[in-house]
Amino acid sequence: MKKTLIYSLSLAVFLLVGCRDESLNPNKPWEPGVHGWGVFDGVAETGKANIAANARNFPLTGQDAAKIDFKIRWVSLDNQLTVNKIVIKVEMRESYTDPDGNPKVASLGVKQVKSIDAPAGNRQWNSFSITPAEVYNLFKDATVKYDKVKDVKVFENPARPRPAGARLQGARPGAAADAFVVTWELTTSTGLVFKVWNEDSICLDPTPVSQANANCRLNFTVR
């Protein structure tokens, strides 16, 4: 009787498992993916200095002839996907003091600044630069309600004049310098698009510099 009960239970378990609808399984198999590794070009990799915030910055003067050089590569650890386009985006953040004396930071939005339409192969570097003029042209129509009521064009704000040769400004009393965040999107030949994800790991990769490194953004300012 005891053996019959054991056989019956075993058969029941087998039938339950064997007839399971895999489409309802919440534990989906891992899919292939790619990630990016962006750095400030010309900065030593020691201690990951080439991804440190403000490793390179726009100058306070001479902005018409200035630029910041970058490098980026895409990485497919399992070699199952190929990236055929890298879109580079930049966000501008302006610091100011509101009418109540509170420090504020206004994001002027995220804009596409570059497109690498034929990137080099897996783990190969692609170079690009961003200039103050490009940033100005992207955000020249951006507005902020400095008084909480009226929209004012950032680059035409009489409370903070921006001369033609130095439209992007450094720190001043009551406000930090203009700040910028560079991010990227990777499009693969299969149509999959990889953006910023898993902020607690891939964006803060703690491992030593290697062929598998990943990050999500680079930050710089005006100094």
Image (tube, rainbow, N blue to C red):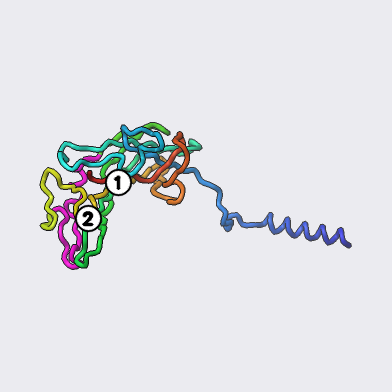
Residue 217: give its label.
none
Q: Is residue 131 left or right of residue 32?
A: left
Give, as a single range, the part of the protein colored magenta.
Answer: 130-155
Task: Please identify the quarter of the rendering in which residue 187 is found.
Answer: top left
Task: Please identify the quarter of the rendering in which residue 25 is found.
Answer: bottom right
Residue 175: give its label.
2
In this orientation, which residue lies closer to the viewer: 41 or 81?
41
In this orientation, which residue lies closer to the viewer: 47 or 127?
47
Residue visible at 82% across and 57% down in the picture: 7
- Tag 2, which secondary structure? loop
Instruction: Name the outermost residue toward the right.
Output: 1
- Tag 1, which secondary structure? strand
Q: In this view, does 8 lie to the left or right of 191?
A: right
Residue visible at 26% across and 54% down in the picture: 109
Q: Is residue 7 above or below residue 221?
A: below
Please check the rendered image and state whether residue 151 is part of the magenta-colored stretch, yes or no: yes
Q: Where is residue 185 in the image (x, y as percent from the top left)?
A: 36, 45
Q: Is residue 160 left or right of residue 52?
A: left
**Which numbered mark, 1 or 2, is in the foreground of this view?**
2
Please check the rendered image and state whether residue 83 is part of the magenta-colored stretch, yes or no: no
Quadrant of the frame with the N terminus: bottom right
Query: Circle 2: is it few (<14), some (14-19), or many (20+) Cα within 10 Å?
Result: some
Quadrant of the frame with the C terminus: top left
In contact (CB < 8 Å): disc 1 and disc 2? no
Q: How many angstroms separate mark 1 from mark 2 (CA)?
A: 24 Å
Instruction: Name the outermost residue toward the front.
Output: 173
Residue 89: give its label.
1
Q: Position of residue 123 (x, y in %)?
A: 42, 33
Residue visible at 14% across and 45% down in the picture: 166
Q: Which amino acid does label 2 sit on?
A: Ala
Earlier-in-chain disc, 1 versus 2: 1
Q: What residue type is labelled 1?
A: Lys
